[in-house]
Image: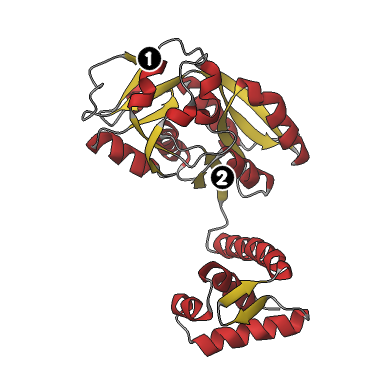
């Protein structure tokens, strides 16, 4: 079995046809068909079924596809590791945050001659998985306080632990084009009249639990989202140039403030978001990770 075969098969699954997969892979449709047939012959089972209505991935093919994606991802990671020099490396995964990226700049100023830095942003689940797989040494996430027991239970199956650092309240971030820009606060009842940019929702997202904090003043189903994005750049540009706003953690370290964005307090919203570190159980952290955590605490 070759990585090429797995790559071709995952692209066929994604595109739904040999011809579209061929365009994506810059090859011919017969070549794609030949590669898939050779993989099926090697495995001894059908991966796709061909008919006049197109392709259908078999149940066995769906399982192979899921494992193939994992194999290709790990192969890519192994390749990327080979491109780095043999010096020390600090790896970190976090939720999207301008404050954290500014702290990473400070890290470079302090450690830049000694460490290569790898930083990834993602959801709580993604950050936890990256730490569990060893792609990053630590992760920084936020969860609702009521999620703590369930979150630690999930992490326990991955041999991870969660160390809370602080508890924060939610807020609304607005830019200079927003009608609330001159205000300092907003009521829960006003949130349904606003338009938001937000990340793709998951169980641990803030929106999922905000209605439990608002005491019935709003249901998160009433929030109006115009854009979903996991890009911090997209969020900042939308806040700066439109009337969109975003829900976030009330966490704005003034020395790191580079944009004309304000955080509005939500009246009656008590602190309920735990910010903390996801790390492997029992592992001693590197000097770089310890430095980062201690300085992150200072921002909080």
Secondary structure of residue under mark 2: strand
Evaluate whether residue 297 shows in this view.
yes
Could you tell me which residue is drawn at 30 percent across and 14 percent down?
184
Label 1: few (<14), some or many (≥20) within 10 Å? some
Could you tell me which residue is drawn at 54 percent across and 30 percent down?
208
Residue hosting label 2: 91
Q: Marks 2 and 1, Cα distance to the nearest angstrom?
A: 39 Å
For the N terminus, the quadrant is bottom right
Q: Position of residue 230 (x, y in %)?
A: 44, 44
Q: Position of residue 225 (x, y in %)?
A: 39, 37
Secondary structure of residue under mark 1: loop
- Of the numbered discs in the image, which one, if any, rests on residue 96? none
Q: Position of residue 180 (x, y in %)?
A: 26, 21
| Residues marked 2 and 1 touching at CB (< 8 Å) | no
Name the N-terminal-most of marks 2 and 1: 2
- Of the numbered discs in the image, which one, if any, rests on residue 187? 1
């Amino acid at each position: 079995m070759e990585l090429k075969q797995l790559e071709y098969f995952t692209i066929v699954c994604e595109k739904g046809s040999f011809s579209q997969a061929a365009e994506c892979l810059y090859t011919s449709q017969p070549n794609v068909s030949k590669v898939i047939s050779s993989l099926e012959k090697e495995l001894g089972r059908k991966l796709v079924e061909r008919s006049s209505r197109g392709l259908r991935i078999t149940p066995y093919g769906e399982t192979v596809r899921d494992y193939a994606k994992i194999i290709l991802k790990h192969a890519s990671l192994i390749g990327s590791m080979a491109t780095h020099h043999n010096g020390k490396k600090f790896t970190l995964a976090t939720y999207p945050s301008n404050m954290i990226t500014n702290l990473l700049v400070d890290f470079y100023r302090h450690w830049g001659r000694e460490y290569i830095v790898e930083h990834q942003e993602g959801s709580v689940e993604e950050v936890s998985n990256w730490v569990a797989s060893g792609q990053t040494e630590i992760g920084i996430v936020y969860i609702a306080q009521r999620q703590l027991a369930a979150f630690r239970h999930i992490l326990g199956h991955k041999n991870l632990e969660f160390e809370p650092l602080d508890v924060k309240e939610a807020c609304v971030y607005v830019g200079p084009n927003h009608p609330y820009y001159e205000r300092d606060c907003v009521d829960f009842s006003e949130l349904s009249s606003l338009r938001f940019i937000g990340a793709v929702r998951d169980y641990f997202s803030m929106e999922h639990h905000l209605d439990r904090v608002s005491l019935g003043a709003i249901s998160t189903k009433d929030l109006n989202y115009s854009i979903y994005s996991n890009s911090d750049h997209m969020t900042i540009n939308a806040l700066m140039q439109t009337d969109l706003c975003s829900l976030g953690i009330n966490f704005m370290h003034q020395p790191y403030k580079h944009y004309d964005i304000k955080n509005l307090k939500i009246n009656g919203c008590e602190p309920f978001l735990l910010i903390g570190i996801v790390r492997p159980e029992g592992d001693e952290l590197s000097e770089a990770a310890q430095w980062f955590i201690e300085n992150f605490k200072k921002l909080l």
